[in-house]
Amino acid sequence: MYDFAAMGKKELLSFGGIVSVSSIIYSDVELLGMLGEKIGERMEAFLEEAKSIRWFENSGKPNEKYDMVFSLYEACDGWGKQYFDVWESRVCELEDIAMKKIGDGAIDDAFDTVSAAIGDTVWKKFGELINRQGLGDELAVCDELFNNIKRDMAWACVEKVLDTPVFFTMLSEIYEEGYFPCSWNGEYPSGWVVVL
């Protein structure tokens, strides 16, 4: 969290566009309150958008924009290294920014809030995908993939809070299209998404 006392009361503060204060004098508590309100508003807006996601409706349907895999095991094992390399570096980059701008508590709130809001629906729709595509013999990796989905969406929420739509926002848009982004083909940012 920021040390408001060290900043000075008249200083222009910008938390990724979350709070802007010019020459008006606010107390530290007022600034924290405004920051908290903006974070809450942006989280609510994100969750409202997430309600319209057509979870996995198009998974298995060819789409020329993406490389496609048709197996849970292929998504985890065949593309796992590329997934880890690209996603982990994006997470570290975003987490560093978020820690400085909104703090660990707000990041944790985003994860808890998103997980609670989408978890049951995503699990149900993921089960429907498994049944539809006959992937019942690949259930050993379901929990891992399910947690990856929630993590993608939680980081997309953090990007929304920070007003910096980049990698995870792109992934949430792919989820909105009804696909499951599960890896990356190529050297990021070149290349393209692999979907299940």
Image (spheres, rainbow, N blue to C red):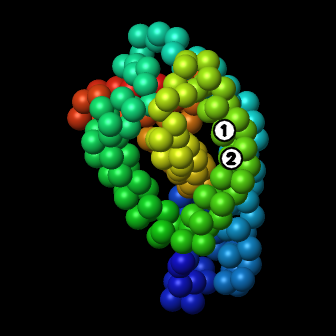
Using the image, tell me which numbered label, if any, was put on residue 122. 1
126 lies above or below 4: above
The percent position of residue 115, horizontal first and vertical second, equals 66, 52
Tell me: residue 181, above or below residue 167. above
Disc 2 to disc 1, how far (Cα)? 5 Å
Q: Quadrant of residue 182?
A: top left
Query: SS at mark 2?
Result: helix
**Quarter holding the N terminus?**
bottom right
Q: Dot 2 corresponds to which residue?
A: 119
Callout 1 amino acid: Val
Q: Position of residue 117 (x, y in %)?
A: 73, 49
Q: Please state which amino acid type lies under the numbered disc 2.
A: Gly
Residue at the image point whose x is 38% and y is 37% from the top: 76
Q: Quadrant of residue 46?
A: top right
Q: Residues within 10 Å of mark 1 (few under 14, many from 20)?
A: some
Q: Is residue 2 left or right of residue 115?
A: left
Who is closer to the viewer here, 33 or 56?
Answer: 56
Q: Label 2: how many residues lie within 10 Å, few (<14), some (14-19) or many (20+)? A: some
Q: Residue furthest left?
A: 187
Residue that sits furthest to the bottom in the current view? 5
Residue sitting nearer the eye, 81 or 45: 81
Residue 51: tell me if it is visible.
Answer: yes
**C-beta proximity under 8 Å, tags 2 and 1:** yes
Can residue 22 be seen? no
Front one among 87 and 97: 87
Percent position of residue 97, x then y: 44, 62
